[in-house]
Amino acid sequence: MQFLEALQYLLSLGHETVTMKLGLRNSQLLLEALGNPQKQLSALQIAGTNGKGSTAAFVDSILRTAGIRTGLYTSPHLISITERIKIGGREISTDNFAELATEVREAAEGLVRDQKLEAYPTFFEQLTAIALLTFARSKVELAILETGMGGRLDATTCAQAHTVAITPIDLDHEEHLGETIEKVAAEKAAIIRPGVTAVIAPQSNAASEVIRERCESTKVTPVFAETSVRLEDSTRDGRFCVSFQNSGNAYKRVWLGLRGRHQIVNVSLAVAVVEALRAKGLVVPRAAIIQGIEMATHPGRLEVFKEKPAFLLDGAHNPAGAQALRNYLDEFAYRPLTLIFGAMRDKRLERMAETLFPVADQVILTQVDNERTAKIEVLEKLAASLVAKERLAVTHSLKEAITVAREKTEPSGVVCVTGSLYLIGEAKGQLQRVKEVARSI
């Protein structure tokens, strides 16, 4: 298959969250048919609700700065599917992606033909197989795997990572993981297996209790990323300079590469993970930790496009993410502030709206170009009690929403696009195209 054909094939399997089937059998059989590439890998698996991608980005940046060849697997992508699979910080090429996708497709078709599977492995299962195959053949020194959903039955768990990390846990994907913190935490804590090193971010009491019980049952002594932090300085756009100390080391006046106060938790977890990897033999100088933190990037998370007005893109797709964004906006956003909001219908929309809508001078509702999008009528009903009519606009596409936002926002203001990472991907693509056109004139 060529790249576009490979992409169409994967998309034909159905949207990754709509068709996702939690369970390991499909992935195990598929990987076995591919020669079990995961068995050639040294892997880190990261689960949790918010901060998985940022933590992975910090760890990846630190290790690459130390000269370690990393593989990074994250989801979802913003513009191109190749963003999900990186080797040494560089996206997989479209040619390589197509070649490996073809190999995985043939293995999947063989399993169905031989009646070992009744149906093809899902989009996420096949994409995970592509990533693991890529990393094995590229001989990465460490594969960093962001869990797709949950942990116990997520395809990334087939990699049998020797080190696992759990970011703060909150409610999300309740239809799959359960409707209480305890149930969600149990699904995510299940990546803790006998013999692994488990590094845990600060948690609520309910989640912490579940994680401790899992550690006890697997005879794993958890490493808690408990860090003493002192804020030293900050930029006007929300990057923090911090000094922090954990049980092993002290790091003074480190500028975080990612914006937002919530990144302090993520970087503390990342550093604890790196120190655990050092204990396993990876050579990571202290200077590489500091430089890696400062150079870390994570597109679509408090990402700024410096225009007039400026655009701020943040994939806050659940209540915890919305609260982190609200905290940032309260502290750093320029005025006037226009909010473009579009989200998925299966999210806790009321809580997200209550958190975000009141902070904005103008709210523009839109729909995401995705079958799971929350319809305008639903969002409009939520906004009715939170936003005065004169501050509310309704649009039916992101392109229209951006046009309206530019009309309603003064050049000195900020337009914040949020509610879904899929919406962020659309916005990033549109804003980049505008930049490219401007440069060509």
Image (cartoon, grey):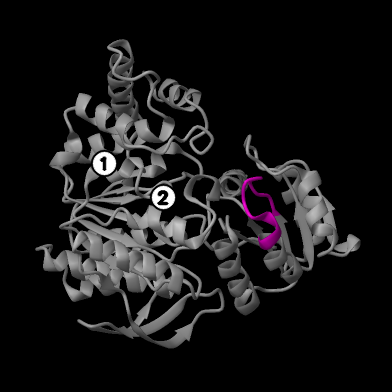
Q: Nearer the viewer, residue 264 or 232?
A: 264
Residue 218 at what x, y percent from top left?
21, 59
Q: Which residues are magenta?
A: 341-351
Let me know if residue 198 appears in the view. no
Q: State the image quarter where residue 333 is shown.
A: bottom right
Q: Are marks 1 and 2 in contact (CB under 8 Å)?
A: no
Q: State the image quarter where residue 321 is shown.
A: bottom right
Residue located 59% across and 50% down the image: 420
Please name the residue that numbered disc 1 is placed on.
158
Which kind of residue does numbered mark 2 sit on? Gly
Q: State the image quarter where residue 325 is shown.
A: bottom right
Judge whether residue 207 is colored magenta: no
Residue 389 at what x, y percent from top left?
90, 60
Residue located 65% across and 49% down the image: 343
Decide: few, some or many residues near mark 2? Use Cα within 10 Å; few <14, some 14-19, many ≥20: many
Which kind of residue does numbered mark 1 sit on? Cys
Secondary structure mostly taken by the magenta-highlighted segment of the chain: loop
Residue 350 at what x, y percent from top left?
71, 58
Judge whether residue 345 is colored magenta: yes
Residue located 26% across and 50% down the image: 88
Please name the residue that numbered disc 2 is placed on.
150
